[in-house]
Amino acid sequence: MVFSSYNFLFIFFPLFFLTYYLLDPRYRNLLILIVSLLFYSIGEGERVIILLISILGNFSFGVIIKRFLEQSKKAALSALVAGIMFNLGLLAYFKYIGFVGENANQVLHMLGIEHMLPVLHIALPLGISFFAFQGISYLMDIYRGTIQATSSLFVFATYKAMFPQLIAGPIVRYADIANDMDDRRVKAEHVFEGIGRFVRGLAKKVLIADTMAATADTIFALPHGELGLSVAWLGVIAYTMQIYFDFSGYSDMAIGMGRMMGFKYPENFNHPYMARSIGDFWRRWHITLSSWFRDYVYFSLGGNRRGAGRTYVNLLIVFALTGLWHGASWTFVIWGLWHGLFMLIERRFNPEKWLIPNALRHVYVMFVVMIGWTLFRADSADVASHMLRAMFGFGEAGTLAWPLAAFANSLVVGTLIVGAIFSMPVYEKVKKLVPGSMVVPGSVVIAAVLVFACSLKVLSGSYSPFLYFRF
């Protein structure tokens, strides 16, 4: 079920929170668990069993690791490895088995072997990348002593299945909300804050991301002979806005609902398009994923403690895996390595010491990011190649090329301007300028206007699934 859909906004959301607030606090976790499983089942049907297997498996491995730690560190490590393989096995089977089969057959063909392996195409369960990584972080944190394994399957299932962050993040670690699972206070200011955050996320998704999606999808689908330089750049810029406002909008909605329930989910975005280096970009973009790879992969590989050469290798491994996490396609891997390449360059030549204005550093970051988004968005390496060639004036378009005016209408241009403005910390700065007595009434008025505008668009049927549902 999509957060920006009619059924969620006008039925699921109000019924859940009305019940939640009327219910005795002792039974709220039970409500969360039941509703979360129902929420997942509505979209995935019988594949909810995969989520239940993940819950039961990770809980069991957590208990085993805890017990082994009291007896033998070596045995606990073996249990940890088994638990990690359990999560990666689920992820590999559902997400990568077809990719592996296709590439294995290509290798066999190159070797002149005619016998081809069967290629399985299995429907990807929503959110499996998120709850697999969530499970790994839980087990590794137990082994490292960061958290204590819960002895309650009910508590763990509630944490694991919590619907706001279940299918597209942010990746909430058990340590983030462990203290709130059994004892939390839902105050009026938390509810007010959560509603405001949810509405801002909804507006990002419905009013900006979905508008940009129509332009980006149309341009990326153009035949090569109809794609000119200016139109290609418009398509990439539109997608640059779409993916940011789509995913940060989802994160805002998830964080807002978590706050309304009494939880404080970690932040996932911090104005990434304001970054002045690629390293800075990754400290601001999908923060819970980049910090996950830092804490559980980069540091486990040795981080930067084994010399410059090993550090560079570790960075490339992390970014290749980051790309592969997003999808079973070489375009995602290349996207990850593209960012990894510039992380290596910045590691060798510190951007803070570049003798260029901050504005030019910002232009450099956005150029690298948009080239990366071209790879990320393209359905294949061939599409990415043709799009990039068109962007730099080497495309195949001639007299058949579409003029920019065919796509850059007033709605698109206006949305791009609004998107550019709100990709900066405008809201935070304006809020500081507003007198304290006007913050609440002003927020209520703005929220009401945004809800009305979003409702009109949702009721018209012009909404789409969140991009990160694919991953």
Image (cartoon, rainbow, N blue to C red):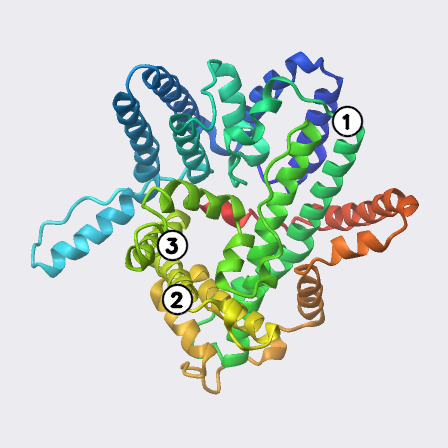
Q: Earlier in the sequence, mark 3 or mark 1?
A: 1
Q: Position of residue 206 (x, y in %)?
A: 67, 51
Q: Locate residue 140, reporting x and y percent.
A: 39, 31
Q: Quadrant of residue 79?
A: top left
Residue at 63 percent across and 48 percent down: it is: 249
Callout 3 crowding tier (Cα within 10 Å): few <14, some 14–19, many ≥20? many
Could you tell whether 175 is left or right of 460 in the image?
left
Q: Is the Cβ of the residue at disc 1 closer than 8 Å to that at disc 2? A: no
Identify the residue shown where x is 66% and y is 60%: 423
Is 379 displayed left or right of 96 in the figure? right
Pick whichever of labels 2 and 3 is earlier in the sequence: 3
Which is nearer the N-term, disc 1 or disc 2? 1
Name the amino acid type tagged 1. Answer: Lys
Amino acid type, label 3? Phe
Q: Which residue is tagged 2?
A: 348
Q: Is residue 5 above or below residue 189?
A: below
Q: Which residue in the structure is indicated by mark 1? A: 187
Q: Secondary structure under badge 1?
A: loop
State the SS at label 3.
helix
Q: Which mark is residue 351?
A: none
